[in-house]
Image (cartoon, grey):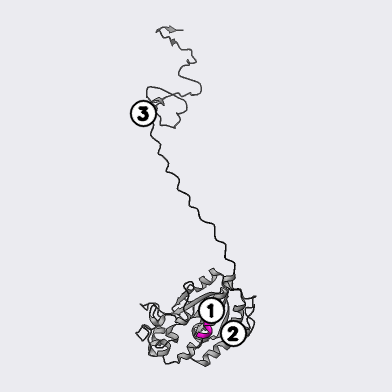
Amino acid sequence: TMLRSQPYSWPCGGPLDASTTALVLIDMQHDFCGKGGYVDRMGYDISATRAPIKPLQRVLAAARAAGVRVIHTREGHRPSLADLPQNKRLRSTAIGTEIGQPGPCGRVLVRGEPGWELIDELRPLPSEDIIDKPGKGSFFATDLEHLLRTTGCQRLLLGGITTDVCVHTTMREANDRGFECCLITDGTGATDRGNHAAAHKMVTMQGGVFGAIASSDAVLQVLDAMPRARDSAPAAAPPPVVLLPPPPPRASRAPAPARARARSGGRRAGKRPQRGSIRRGDGLPPLVCGRARKCSSAAPSRRGSARTSRDGRTAP
């Protein structure tokens, strides 16, 4: 299934498939579209940044039903502000809403504060990933690319705020990394309507230099036509892991008795006697003959030396 999008039917690499597609909702936070948040305190009309909420609610429900992976992003900084660049801090100070300073929604753009949280209308499910980012792009200083690669997602549906800043930066980053992107036109919003429209037009230039754009109705038409995630056949359960009991400890070998060592000529158990040695039963070290192969303890010498009989007589 292909989207009715501009300037080409998206995706260009073949029909849309839930297993390779992710819906990325960018920075739908109180600080950007809530009363008393960062954007509101700068003096902008937050109705423009709240405009994409209802279209995104419909797209989000359809994506979940179709089994499309959903990813949310949040912009914010550590409470220590150690990851806040100096130029960003100075700019926010110049317009009267310094990042990190207290405000109606807590410290401005600081992680863990009420203004930093995602809005209730688009609250993530426990199974959905949230990318916390310190900058405008969702790939900078995050593990978003790693997450997309490991889950096999190659196509991104992009929505959120603001169109001309965080959404557009993320789309450009994704395009440079080889992901095929489609921006949901009424699923994005900006503080300036002219910038919002210009950001859409930029995508379509040069035959879709950054990807494609489509309305939420066009996206819904494709998502609703996909097989429902609950109708898909469940994946086969992996075979159970059987843990075998550990082998019994090996019994230590008892040392040989002293008399056994005596019978073996004082040698250690299991050790062969030296080649050419003569065993003795008196516990003394074995005798060694220099000519082991041609002599024994009972054989006479070659010169016919005299032998002594049992009665003490000498035999010739």
Question: Which residue is the site of mark 1?
Answer: 61
At x 37% / y 29%, what residue is drawn?
Answer: 257
Q: Nearer the viewer, mark 3 or mark 1?
A: 1
Which numbered disc flags the more N-terminal residue, 2 or 3?
2
Which amino acid lies under the numbered mark 2 shown in the image of this protein?
Asp
Label 1 Cα neighbours within 10 Å, binned few <14 / some 14-19 / many ≥20: some
Which amino acid lies under the numbered mark 1 shown in the image of this protein?
Ala
Question: Which residue is the site of mark 3?
Answer: 258
* Element carrying mark 1: helix
At x 54% / y 82%, what residue is drawn?
Answer: 58
Question: Which residue is the site of mark 2?
Answer: 217
Give yes or no for residue 46 being in the magenta stretch. no
Q: Main secondary structure of the magenta part?
A: helix
**How far apart are the alpha carbons under marks 3 and 1?**
85 Å
Q: Nearer the viewer, mark 2 or mark 3?
A: 2
Apparent side of residue 236 relative to residue 268 in the rendered image (left or right) = right
Looking at the rendering, the stretch of residues picked out in magenta corresponds to 53-57
297 to 247, vertically: above or below: above
Which numbered disc flags the more N-terminal residue, 3 or 1?
1
Give the percent coordinates (x, y) of residue 82.
37, 77
